[in-house]
């Protein structure tokens, strides 16, 4: 559980100030002031026009493959191509050749990859990389570069380039000389991973280009896409999925045996491979609908993707003049006991040194203590802004038409409700019976009817029931038929080393988190971004600083998206596959690590400008690079937020939700690590999807935070009510939780772990359980079986008979002795 040092208590940094009063109080006051300043600064935070998707745009994903320190290598790739191309084709450019001529040249270059000379192999690989990058020296615009890149990549795949590069990649992974050379160096730089970076770049461009579908795709390209997808995800002849090779590279890097591996490129390729083979959000939705139909379950009450995309963030706060005007109008109407804030995150903190309530929040508390008299912020979104003419009070208020989500009820919830009612009115219970209502009052009948109308049975519930039946009746139910889909094959391949993969990914995530401090024992994730010669001028240092920050952000983006994909696909494939991955994430301290990540000024992280637009691919290869100045480093980026950072934040919040949903022990971890103030600060980001997942995390722990916290955060309670799905008899807002007994938490995790181990043993254990092996008791069938005897037995069987049978006396009395 503690392989990842430094994550324990990651979300607790701002609360461990309980030292001596003389020294602790000034620090706490300083911290309190900075938090108030941060909260007040969020008043101008705008709405973020962000559309969540599987990936960013094409140019954004391609540009993030390359570090800015790799920029000189673009020209090197072109020179390697040009030197070879001119020996084969005279007076013609690549774009002027017809397809057969282009294929013939590619075949010749692929032959050059098989030479013994390492430098010649690298030059040929660079020539192929130049083709995959879109022969940019022959293009006039970025659109042309992307067009020729797409055209060339499909040609390269048709000619077997990916298979050839896969062999070269395996050679480089097993290159012990390169590993030992990197281990001896005091500082590893970009030059130590040259061959690997070229190979991984070509493979990434092939995977990402073929994965993307466009309207003008040729029919043969669609066939190639399906073939390549099957080749990566469902390999034949007992081979392992390609993603497993990349997972192996990650663990080898984290173990310290290969510190020169370019981790950013490995992680990007791994993420895109899993995304391509397993599918994205739309594919998941299609498979969910199909599986529910196969299990005879009713369809979804709504499309969750559409609901989330149609949500609005909390209304922007009023500015100081508007606030003053509102206060003056209120003073004319008379003094009111409650003064409401105009935004969810315009927090008005109390003095932290007043001892209000032991159960209250120790950080930034809202002064509002009720919801009477005014509408909540989310209700204001729907009201027309100009004040209507005076009418009756009931006509002045325009309430929302409905909640965004249909409510759900689990079968367990109905069972608990009936158990309480039977105990109260009848005096005994009927176990799991949810149909017998004898002896119960009429209102209880109506309540059960309403609960059953909104009863929701998930695919996971059905899978767990079937697994219980298979465990109880292994002989009568026979062997389970498991469909070999890509998710199933990937899980089988990852199963035995999955804990190592999880720990390695979280170690890299910890090293890339902006809140982490450099430690001597932490892994070096900057090997593939640092140049051989360190910068000597201020501008070069600024450029490298931007590059390093960008490098870390891309790594966080890739790992967060990868983990979320694995969790979602494993959950859909089988719930216990999801639980196995989830438990190992929890054991490796993923929950405090994510809280540690969010324990920063999240608005600054989302609006960070760690990009140099003029150096992004493909802009930098079709335009002259201007002389770098402080102005040109910031030119061109007009976005109000960084797409990858907001994407990463949402992914991490979704992972945290998946780990803690319906798990009381993990919910208590959120409470113990004091996640509520951290999550409250994340609500300042005016983006509906991010706010939704923050509110979900606050909802599950609300009952544990105490009455004072709920009283002081009524705006958050109101937002949870309006944005998060309801479970009809979930008393999240009141704290009357019968399952919140602390002594059950350990039992809950142990029971889950036992169920997971039984599932893995039953389905994937190659050693059959001898207790369930059928025994043939028929003498005729046993004697009639043909046994293949070794060849040497035929020549020596007479000697064997003489020694083992004829010369041995039969001791019949041994048969009578009890054994």
Image (cartoon, rainbow, N blue to C red):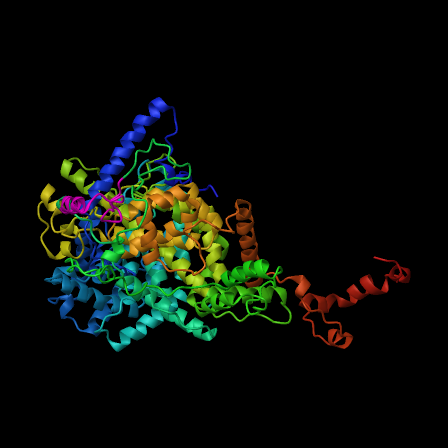
Residue occupying image coordinates x 43% and y 73%: 298
Residue occupying image coordinates x 48% and y 51%: 737
Residue occupying image coordinates x 16% and y 71%: 97
Locate residue 145, reporting x and y percent: 16, 62
Whether residue 190 can be seen here: yes
Locate residue 132, reporting x and y percent: 23, 62
Viewer-closest of 164 and 614:
614
Viewer-closest of 472 and 176:
472
Whether residue 65 can be seen here: no
| Quarter of the rendering containing residue 12 | top left
Left or right, residue 300 beside residue 619: right
Locate residue 685, reporting x and y percent: 25, 50
Locate residue 342, reporting x and y percent: 22, 49
In the rendered image, which quarter contains the C terminus? bottom right
Left or right, residue 798 beside residue 649: right
Q: Which residues are magenta?
A: 322-348
71 versus 232 height, above or below: above
| Quarter of the rendering containing residue 537 | top left
């Amino acid at each position: 559980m503690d392989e990842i040092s430094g994550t324990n208590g990651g979300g607790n940094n701002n609360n461990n100030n309980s030292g001596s009063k003389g020294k602790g109080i000034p620090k706490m006051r300083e911290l309190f002031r900075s938090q108030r300043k941060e909260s007040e600064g969020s008043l101008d935070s705008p709405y973020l026009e962000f559309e969540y998707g599987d990936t960013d745009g094409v140019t954004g994903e391609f540009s993030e493959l390359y570090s800015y320190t790799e920029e000189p290598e673009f020209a090197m790739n072109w020179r390697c191509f040009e030197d070879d191309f001119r020996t084969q084709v005279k007076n013609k450019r690549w774009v002027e050749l017809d397809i057969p001529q282009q294929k013939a040249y590619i075949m010749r270059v692929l032959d050059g990859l098989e030479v013994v000379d390492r430098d010649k192999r690298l030059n040929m690989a660079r020539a192929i990389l130049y083709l995959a990058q879109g022969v940019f020296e022959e293009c006039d615009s970025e659109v042309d570069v992307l067009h020729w890149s797409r055209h060339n990549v499909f040609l390269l795949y048709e000619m077997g380039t990916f298979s050839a590069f896969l062999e070269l990649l395996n050679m480089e992974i097993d290159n012990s000389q390169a590993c030992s050379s990197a281990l001896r160096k005091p500082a590893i730089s970009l030059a130590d991973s040259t061959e690997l970076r070229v190979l991984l770049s070509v493979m990434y461009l092939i995977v990402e280009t073929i994965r993307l579908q466009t309207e003008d795709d040729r029919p043969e390209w669609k066939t190639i896409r399906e073939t390549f997808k099957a080749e990566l995800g469902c390999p034949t002849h007992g081979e392992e999925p390609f993603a497993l090779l990349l997972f192996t590279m990650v663990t080898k890097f984290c173990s310290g045996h290969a510190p020169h591996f370019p981790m950013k490129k490995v992680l990007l390729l791994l993420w895109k491979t899993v995304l391509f083979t397993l599918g994205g959000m739309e594919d998941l939705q299609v498979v969910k609908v199909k599986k529910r139909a196969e299990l005879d379950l009713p369809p979804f009450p709504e499309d969750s993707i559409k609901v989330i995309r149609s949500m609005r963030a909390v209304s922007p706060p009023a500015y100081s003049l508007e606030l003053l005007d509102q206060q003056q109008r209120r003073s004319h109407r008379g003094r009111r006991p409650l003064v409401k804030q105009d935004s969810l995150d315009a927090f008005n903190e109390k003095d932290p040194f007043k001892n209000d309530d032991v159960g209250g929040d120790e950080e930034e508390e809202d002064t509002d203590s009720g919801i009477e008299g005014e509408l909540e912020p989310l209700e204001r979104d729907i009201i027309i802004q100009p004040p209507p003419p005076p009418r009756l009070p009931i006509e002045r208020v325009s309430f929302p038409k409905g909640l965004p989500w249909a409510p759900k009820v689990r079968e367990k919830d109905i069972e608990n409700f009936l158990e309480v009612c039977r105990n109260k009115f009848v005096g005994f219970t009927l176990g799991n019976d949810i149909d017998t209502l004898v002896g119960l009052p009429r209102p209880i009948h109506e309540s059960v009817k309403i609960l059953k109308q909104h009863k929701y049975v998930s695919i996971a519930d059905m899978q767990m029931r079937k697994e219980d039946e298979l465990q109880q009746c292994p002989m009568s139910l026979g062997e389970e038929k498991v469909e070999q889909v890509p998710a199933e094959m990937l899980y089988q391949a990852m199963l035995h080393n999955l804990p190592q993969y999880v720990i390695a990914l979280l170690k890299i995530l910890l090293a890339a988190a902006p809140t982490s401090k450099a430690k001597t024992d932490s892994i070096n994730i900057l090997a593939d971004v640092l140049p051989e010669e360190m910068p000597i001028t201020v501008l070069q240092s600024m450029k490298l600083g931007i590059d390093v920050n960008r490098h870390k952000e891309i790594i966080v983006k890739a790992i967060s998206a990868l983990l979320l994909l694995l969790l979602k696909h494993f959950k859909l494939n089988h719930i216990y596959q999801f639980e196995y991955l989830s438990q190992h994430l929890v054991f490796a301290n993923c929950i405090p690590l994510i809280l540690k990540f969010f324990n920063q000024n999240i608005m600054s992280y989302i609006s960070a400008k760690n990009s140099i637009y003029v150096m992004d691919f493909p802009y930098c290869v079709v335009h002259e690079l201007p002389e770098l100045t402080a102005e040109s480093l910031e030119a061109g980026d007009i976005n109000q937020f960084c797409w990858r950072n907001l994407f990463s934040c949402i992914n991490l919040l979704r992972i945290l939700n998946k780990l803690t949903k319906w798990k009381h022990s993990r919910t208590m971890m959120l409470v113990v690590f004091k996640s509520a103030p951290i999550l409250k600060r994340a609500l300042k980001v005016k983006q509906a999807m991010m706010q939704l997942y923050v509110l979900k995390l606050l909802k599950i722990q609300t009952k544990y935070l105490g009455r004072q916290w709920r009283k002081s955060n009524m705006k958050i309670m109101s937002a949870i009510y309006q944005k998060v799905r309801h479970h009809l008899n979930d008393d999240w807002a009141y704290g009357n939780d019968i399952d919140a007994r602390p002594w059950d938490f350990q039992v809950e995790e142990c029971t889950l772990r036992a169920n997971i181990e039984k599932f893995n043993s039953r389905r994937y254990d190659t050693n059959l359980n001898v207790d369930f092996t059928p025994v043939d008791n028929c003498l005729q069938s046993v004697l009639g079986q043909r046994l293949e005897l070794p060849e040497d037995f035929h020549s020596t069987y007479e000697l064997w008979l003489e020694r083992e049978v004829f010369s041995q006396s039969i001791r019949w009395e041994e048969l009578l002795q009890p054994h």
